[in-house]
Amino acid sequence: GKFQIAVIVGSLRRDSFNRKLANAIVKLAPSEFSFKQVQIGDLPLYNQDDDANQAESVKRLKSDIGTAQGLLFVTAEYNRSIPGVLKNAMDHASRPYGQNAWAGKPAGVLGVSVGATGTALAQQHLRNVLAYLDVPTLGQPEAFIQAKDGLFDASGNIGPDSSKFLQGWMDKYVAWVKKHAA
Ligand code: FNR
């Protein structure tokens, strides 16, 4: 596609609702957009001592982000914040100092949780980090999604109850990426 998007899923769980959401929502994008989930589960724990000698997995992450025209975060909420595995990836790609791979990449934030707050608190923490990393993040619409029967249909697409809302979200996200690419 003309617009390559790096998708960062904030959960390593095999049957992650957030990964399912990431897989389903990309089908609502136009064909000029292509999406690639970046791998974050094999990154070492961030250690500033390694800044001058980043692991191959870190270089791969930074390269995947560097070549993307946009970012899509789809994250779980752990204890009212973002999972450590996501923060670890964000810290890695922000360094060494002055070589922040995230900077300037337009982003969207989504999440699904089993709780009724639908990752609202995690998303708010994530927005705080993204602001510091100089990532222009789509403000509206917000999408706080609760995992319920019927969220996905049998083929893994967004189910009928949420498809209109999430199509609207995707349309705004697409416009946001294009605006920043221009
Ligand atoms: C959770 N869960 C959770 N849910 C929520 O709505 N708010 C929260 O603060 C938390 N906290 C939390 C902490 C930890 C350590 C775990 C393991 C879980 C539940 C969470 O929404 C649920 O496990 C989701 O299934 C996680 O998303 P994935 O892995 O399905 O994408």
Image: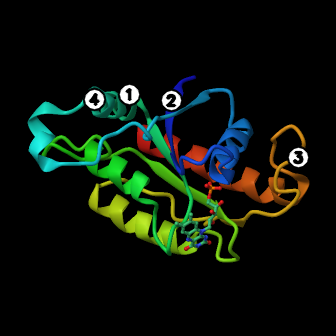
* Quarter placement of the N terminus: top right
In the rendered image, is residue 114 in sight? yes
Q: Which mark is residue 59?
A: 4
Query: Mark 1: which amino acid?
Result: Thr
Query: Mark 4: which amino acid?
Result: Lys
Q: Nearer the viewer, mark 2 or mark 4?
A: 4
The image quadrant in which ligand 1 is located: bottom right
- The answer for how far apart the CA atoms under marks 2 and 1 are is 8 Å
Q: Which mark is residue 153?
A: 3
- The answer for how far apart the CA atoms under marks 3 and 4 are is 37 Å
Proximity of marks 3 and 4: CB atoms separated by less than 8 Å: no
Choose the circle earlier in sequence order: 1 or 3. 1
At 47% from the left and 50% from the top, the residue drawn is 107
Q: Is residue 141 left or right of residue 52?
A: right
At 35% from the left and 47% from the top, the residue drawn is 89
Assess mark 3: CB under 8 A from ligand 1? no
Query: Mark 3: which amino acid?
Result: Asp
In the rendered image, is residue 182 in sight? no
Q: Quadrant of residue 36?
A: top right
Residue 160: % across, % down: 90, 54
Choose the circle earlier in sequence order: 4 or 1. 4
Proximity of marks 4 and 1: CB atoms separated by less than 8 Å: no
182 vs 75, nearest the viewer: 75
Q: Is residue 62 left or right of residue 81?
A: left
- The answer for how far apart the CA atoms under marks 4 and 1 are is 12 Å
* Quarter placement of the C terminus: top left
* Residue behind mark 2: 4
* Residue behind mark 1: 67
Q: Nearer the viewer, mark 1 or mark 3?
A: 3
